[in-house]
Amino acid sequence: MSTIADDDAFVTVAFSLQSNPGAYAVLVGAGVSQGAVPTAWEVLTSLIVDVAHLKGAEVAADEAERWWADAFGTEATYENVLESLAPTQHERQRLLRGFFENAPEAVGPNGEGAIRPNSAHRCIARLVKLGVVRVILTTNFDHLLEEAVRDELIQPTVIAGDADVLGMAPLHTLDCCIIHLHGDYLYPETMLNTVTELNEYKPAVAGLLNDVLGQYGLLVSGWSARYDKALRGAIAAQASRRYTMVWMEPFDLSQEAQQLTTNQKALVMRSSADEGFGELTEAVESLQIRRARQPLAMPAAVETAKRELSGRWTAIRLHDTLNKEFDRSSDTVDLPDYRNAADYGGLAALVASTEEHSQILAALLAVMAYWGDEGTDDWWVDEIGRLSAQPRASGLVALLKVRLIASSFLFYAAGVAAVAKKRYGLLARLLALERPDPSWGDTRQPLAEILSAASSYEETSDAPHRHYGKVTAVLREALRFSDSKLQDLWQRFEVIRLAHNIQRALLFHTNLPVFLEQQSLLDESLDRYPDLGNTGDVDPLEIRRDREAFSREWGFALNRMAEGMLVQPLWPHVLGRDTHAPIATWRCDIAQQLFDEISAQGDDHPLVIAGIGPDGETLAAAVRAVSHAIGRRARESSMRPSGIQPEEVWADTGRAPYEMLN
């Protein structure tokens, strides 16, 4: 057995994984799922306690197996315990789902209490996504690894018993194979738990296990080795010596594990599953980025920035790093010649290279926008404007605009992070950035308009969706937010950006007084006559006609205010939905939420205080116009020649959320 310092160990293992992609299999035990789902023993004893209760006995969990043996004269196994509680296969499946699946009543409004993959599951799935792990052995019954891998948009092949082995494709042809050595809770007859059951695997599973152990190195975590005689024996006899076995364990090894690691000359790292797989994932990603010719690895840059921003002294190194990254980014987009894309491998290659070289600086700005302050904002905000300035040169528009792709990465990464932290003063500063208009020297162009994906990319039809995917990948690394949270934050930023822009439009200001007047008249009528069955001497038909007139004029003004947005060929990544309201039925939910907030708080809303709108009434109207424009775009895109007509549509792709999964 070899134990070395944690940092050195992670570097060693990361290099091995990266240098030999797919050569290692991961073996995980109950320690990986601990806290997310009950262990195998906890499930069995809980079921026995339930049986005892039915028999009129109250039994503690640690006495459950002994009680069963005394009561029934047999060893407690899943099959005979389950048969006592659930005679049919269907009933047994439903019973076990309670341990491993989310019950609606147990999940809170914000998802608290839900059974979900933990950090270790997510990091293992990320290693699969990175291509360095393809085979996962697990002694657990749950499906959390499968869920985590599917969240990375990879469909794993799942093996839970002999029948699955007989029908599987060769291991080396599979993107990901998850092998449940001790069975699957959906198939109780495959579940192994007792010492007797764990003494020997069925032939097909044993053969597959031997193949894996003979062909792959082994990365072990969360497995004590104490009770699994068959698995211990297979590892001792079959484990490959071509690759160093790696064993992660935060505590002292069991006697059985110590014997295995000593005999196999394993590398033992003192680390939990969450910490260990997290460190490995970051290290592998760092190596991959470095091999992609990035001079600074994104994970390392992000973590360094966070550490320096949390210190008590000025982060001088971070300031210097920012300057170097801005210089490097400027060197990347300052092309020697803007007349021929072929000089750079074609426009597509140049765009991809620009995106790649913008990731680290975008991640740094996201960290600074979220964890920084007004003092550190001064280090970088104005640099975005300088990077965006068009060079004094002639050439192809697509090549002249490449620098806007880099600037857009920075603008969106910082903007979304500012929204996430509710740093609306910083957001207002970003939205106020301008550059000289290259066509009219005496005028200025707002970056909030020209750094949209639609304006930054040239000759790229899927620009907004591509841009969203690239930048949110950076934000995921920098802020560690879930995809769903990033999706909502992205939309909120877009709505605020568009509302800021629309307030500059002549059509908006021309129609705003009519919109506000008709809204006021309609609200006044609703307040005065809430019940048309009790209107006193006033004819209810006249009230209804007035309301229809108010609504008609209000809708006309709203359409005109939104008209400036409706002419754009490419739309941002925001979701429109049919609310089935009486008028303006299609809206943007994120915009509607913001509208409600501003309407309730008025001039005291933080966006108004930050100066993003002159007053609450005007900003709320701008947000409402944005919602309406997005809704109209979504409604037009929702039309299908046949079949189901979607009620939600992404504005950038014109596709429903469920269609994006296909």
Image: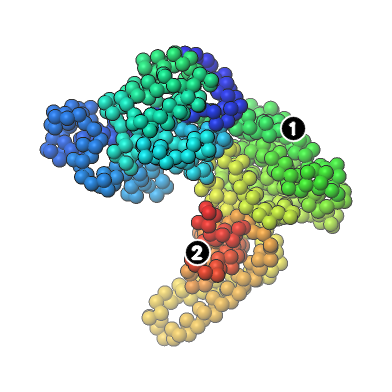
According to the picture, the residue beneath numbered tag 2 turns out to be: 647
Q: Residue at x 14, y 32 (%)?
A: 72
Residue 488 marker = none
**What whole-number distance in Å separates the C-alpha atoms at marks 1 and 2?**
47 Å
Kindly state the secondary structure of the residue where label 2 is placed.
Answer: loop
Residue 32 seen in this snapshot = no
Q: Along the horizontal axis of the image, is 442 left or right of 324? A: right
Q: Nearer the viewer, residue 10 or 74?
A: 74
Nearest to the observer: residue 237 or residue 47: 237
Q: Residues within 10 Å of mark 2 (few under 14, many from 20)?
A: some
Examine the rendered structure and indicate whether residue 205 appears above or below residue 247.
below
Q: Residue at (26%, 46%) from the top-left corner?
A: 89
Give residue 474's position: percent from left, percent from top: 61, 41
Q: Secondary structure at mark 1?
A: helix
Labels 1 & 2 near each other (Cβ < 8 A): no
x, y (%) of residue 498? 64, 58
Would you say 147 lies left or right of 385 here? left
Residue at 64% from the left image edge and 38% from the top image edge: 363
Quarter residue 308 falls in? top right
Camera-side mark, 1 or 2: 2
Q: Which residue is mark 1?
A: 324
Residue 52 occupies quadrant? top left
Q: Where 527 falls versus 328 (above or below)?
A: below
